[in-house]
Image: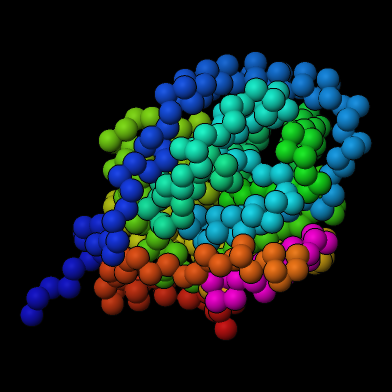
Amino acid sequence: MTKEKSALHEPLPTQKKPRPKNPVLLSLPTHTHMYGTLVDALRPLFVQAGKLESTWNRSNFEKRPIQRPLFICGAARSGSSALLEGVYKTEAFAIHRNKDYPFVDTPIMWNRFISVPTGRDRIPIERAGDDGLNITSESPETLEEMLWTPFFDNLHNPAKDNRLRSDTVNPDFERYYKDNIQKMLLAQRKNRYASKNNYALMRIKYLNRIFPDACFVVVIRHPGPQIASMIKQHRLFLKWERKNPRMAQYVRRIKYFDLGAGRRSINIGDSDITHEISQCWKSGDDISGYAHLWNHLYRYVYDHLIEDPALKNNLIVLRYEDLCENPSAVLRRVLRMVNFDLGDEKLFPIVDGIRAPNYYESGFTDEERRRIRAITGQTSSLFYR
């Protein structure tokens, strides 16, 4: 009998259609790379520049008050990017875009001097991740973590608790962050703010204290497909980082540690499970590592967030499968939570491209599927009844 092959040793899944040869990160323009190098090297200076910009524009903040900001988060590859894309296409929210990198501290100044995108900039190409999501320089991007890391230690240290709680106090950051959101509202001429930052999952209680009217969406995906996607993307990131060092530098500069050579586990108050995840990855057992990570994150959501009275009316857990099956209903639910609604004639074109992926199979063996169920089954049953 032929021995069943493990997904860990399978080649990358065969694609069903040709993919662009230059994902956006691999083709990071030279001038953008140079700007990123400058901002990274002089990070404290650009934080001070952001504070100065806020001082210059503070008199205008009352024109764009922060009201019911929307924070989207979840484990990597949960489908949060698809939801963010839908929210962005409503054209009602100020959201970080690819072209905002790396000058996230000074959005007003940068938006005044940024070049108008050319026709070439607007041609969609598939984002790094090979997941079928096409983007341009105008597309939303996860850049917000660049604002957090200068103000907090241990946000991404697996040996320390990464959570920020309701009793966490950091006046300097809180003022800086609120000012930055108001500047984005002014710069993009919007009345609402939205972000997608998976690390916000560990900061929901803190954000809820800062913004009592904030809304939170935690996106979850069934563990089997999500773990398969994590492994696939991790391999692709490793491949691309070896091929082009710019990508590795970009990923590090935007503080993305879910995938690739800089991958780190997340500590939500349990150093033992965090260590186990790291050891699984170190030994090459990506399946068990990501299964434990999935279970670690979503068990925290169930045990500590869903039942929190302070979050009762401000937090929803959204299943990716529901988003794919009925995107208009799901997006409408999210928008209504932030007191914003669209008519069907505007909503349907926005959600037209949202559907379940069909471009690869997990390749997991029966034993690997059993292992995933053994690790995630109990938590999964809480969300998938």
Q: Main secondary structure of the magenta part?
A: helix
**Foreground of the two, 328 or 52:** 328
At a point 65% along the width and 35% down the height, the residue shown is 148
**Which residue is situated farthest in the left direction here?**
1
Quadrant assignment for the N terminus: bottom left
**Foreground of the two, 381 or 334:** 334
Quadrant assignment for the C terminus: bottom right
The picture places residue 346, in percent across and down from the top left corner, at 69, 64
The answer to whether residue 296 is magenta is no
Compared with 73, 324 (above or below) is: below
At a point 47% along the width and 22% down the height, the residue shown is 31
Q: Taking the image as drawn, is residue 311 in sight?
A: no
Q: Is residue 322 left or right of residue 206?
A: left
The picture places residue 308, in percent across and down from the top left corner, at 77, 64
Q: Is residue 22 left or right of residue 11?
A: right
**Which residue is situated farthest in the front direction here?**
119
Question: For the image shown, how many numbered marks are present on the structure?
Answer: 0
The picture places residue 155, in percent across and down from the top left corner, at 60, 39
**Foreground of the two, 378 or 323:** 323
Q: Is residue 340 left or right of residue 23?
A: right
Q: Taking the image as drawn, is residue 172 in sight?
A: yes
Q: Is residue 15 left or right of residue 30?
A: left
The answer to whether residue 337 is magenta is yes
At a point 69% along the width and 25% down the height, the residue shown is 112
Provide the residue span drawn in magenta. 323-341
Compared with 252, 329 (above or below) is: below
